[in-house]
Image (cartoon, grey):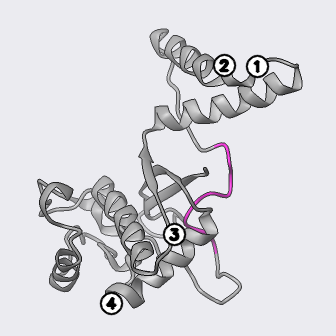
Amino acid sequence: MPIITFTVGDWSDDGHGMCASYYAQSSLPVQDLREIHYQAKDVLGFAIGDICCDTEDAQLSEDERAILTEAGLLEGDHWPNFPDVWQPEDVARLWMDILVYVAQQTDTPLTLTPMGEDEVLGHSLAEILRREARAHGLDPEAAPLLAAAVIERIQAAGSPISATPSNSGSTMHFYGHDSQGRHLSVPGYGTFFT
C-alpha cells in the first residue's frame, strides 16, 4: 500500500512559503485519491482546496461547517475537541476524512491510515532492507524488525532523523494541470497565521 503525502499550505512556495506535510498509507494509488479529491465538490458542494484557503483564514466557513456536520464528519468521537481555529494538522486530518467520506459516497473502497514521520521512515527503511535482503538471498521478513532497531539506535544516539515516503511521486499536490486540465488546490493556506 502506497504512502501518500498530504501537504497543507503553500507547498509551491509562491505565496507565504509555509507548509507542512502529513502522511497516510492508502489502499488506493495517488492518482485515484486525486480523482476522489476532485469529486468532493460534487459530493459536498465545495472543493477541498477551499478549506482555510486565504491568508489568515483558519476557520471553516459557516457553509462548510454545516455541510461537514450534516455529513457526520465534525461530530462525536470523530472530533471530540472541534477546533475554532484550525491548525495545519487539523486540516490534513479533515482532508483525509473527506476523501474517505467521498469515496464511501461514490462506492469506492478506500482506507487511509495516518502515519507519523517515524512510521514513514520505518516503512521506507524496511522496504530498502527487504530489497537488499532479497538481492543477497536473505530473509526479507526480518526487514521491519531490523528497520525499527536501526531507527531506535539512531534516535538513542540523539541524531536527528526525518522521513519522506520512499515511493516518490506520491504527493497529492502537483504542478500545473492534469490531462483533463484540472489543477489540484490543497487546503490550509491560511492556517499558518494563527
Q: Is 83 placed left or right of 175 in the picture?
A: left
- When the figure is inspected, residue 26 is found, relative to residue 31, above or below; the finding is above
| C-alpha span from label 1 to label 2 | 6 Å
Instruction: Report the span colored magenta.
Output: 166-175
Q: Is 19 placed left or right of 173 in the picture?
A: left
The secondary structure that dominates the magenta segment is loop
Does label 2 or label 3 sit earlier along the sequence?
A: 3
Image spot of residue 110 (x, y percent):
48, 64
The reply to whether discs 1 and 2 touch (Cβ–Cβ < 8 Å) is: yes
| C-alpha span from label 2 to label 4 | 47 Å
Report the residue marked by disc 3. 14
Does label 4 or label 1 sit earlier along the sequence?
A: 4
Report the residue marked by disc 2. 142
Does label 3 or label 1 sit earlier along the sequence?
A: 3
Instruction: Identify the element where label 3 is drawn.
Output: loop
Measuring 45% from the left and 73% from the top, which residue is drawn there? 103
For the residue carrying disc 4, how many other residues have a C-alpha within 10 Å: few (<14), some (14-19), or many (20+)? few
For the residue carrying disc 1, how many other residues have a C-alpha within 10 Å: few (<14), some (14-19), or many (20+)? few
